[in-house]
Amino acid sequence: MKQRIYTDTSVFVGYYDEEFSEHTIPLFNRLRNNEFTLLFSTVTQDELENAPEKVKDLVKSIKVENTEFIETTNEAVDLAREYITEKVVGQTSLADCLHIALATINRADFLVSWNFKHIVNVDRIRGYNSINIKYGYKQLEIRSPREFEKYEDERKTI
């Protein structure tokens, strides 16, 4: 069974960002090769509303059969608010919390992000997962696109 990955907006934008593209483009190539199912949410859709056209075109380039669209639910909003109540992040990070909650509730195998301040951060990950466990959800694997690169075997025969 294919792994299901939830990507936040930073990953789409990272495709065209000089600092992040080296590791983001291979992830999208793997998505195009049908190696993963991409979980795409209403939150991501709303955040990309004002993105540059090339980012919107990137979203459109992903085959529908390789995606799963997920709606924001009251359950996700409640869980996102709980992350804030428990001070994993501050009030201004509700959208980031919604990404985490949606990935958690929809049982994503991974949440992938370039947001090191609010998401891909050891202390934050521990906080999110402690809340997830407290409310009966499984822990969420949170990673950067860099961790999805495939490396060829570099051993040489002498």
Image: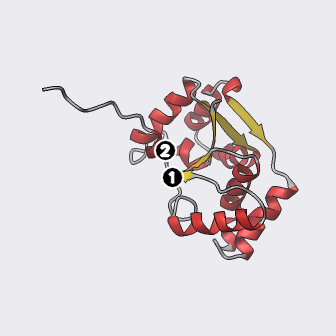
In the rendered image, residue 146, in percent from the top left (x then y), is placed at 43, 45
In the rendered image, residue 111, in percent from the top left (x then y), is placed at 61, 49
**Image: 5 above or below 135:** above
**Image: 33 above or below 109:** above
Residue at 49% across, 49% down: 144
Q: Residue furthest right?
A: 74
**Image: 148 above or below 77:** above
Q: Which mark is residue 114?
A: 1
Q: Is residue 156 left or right of residue 22?
A: left
Q: Please tell me which residue lies in front, 49 or 70.
A: 70
Badge 1 density bin: few <14, some 14–19, many ≥20, Cα 10 Å = many
Residue at 50% across, 35% down: 27
Determine whether label 1 and label 2 are within 8 Å by CB: yes
Q: Please tell me which residue lies in front, 85 or 127.
A: 127
In the rendered image, residue 100, in percent from the top left (x then y), is placed at 67, 56
Which of discs 1 and 2 lies nearer the camera? The answer is: 2
**Quarter location, residue 75:** bottom right
Q: Please tell me which residue lies in front, 64 or 110.
A: 110
Answer with mark 1 or mark 2, whichever residue precedes in sequence: 1
In the rendered image, residue 112, in percent from the top left (x then y), is placed at 56, 47
Q: Secondary structure at mark 2?
A: helix
**Quarter location, residue 41:** top right
Please give the residue where the numbered disc 2 appears in the rendered image. 145
Q: Secondary structure at mark 1?
A: loop
Residue at 77% across, 68% down: 81
Q: CA distance from mark 1 to mark 2?
A: 7 Å
Amino acid type, callout 1: Trp
Amino acid type, callout 2: Pro
Quadrant (top left, top right, bottom left, bottom right) of the C terminus: top left
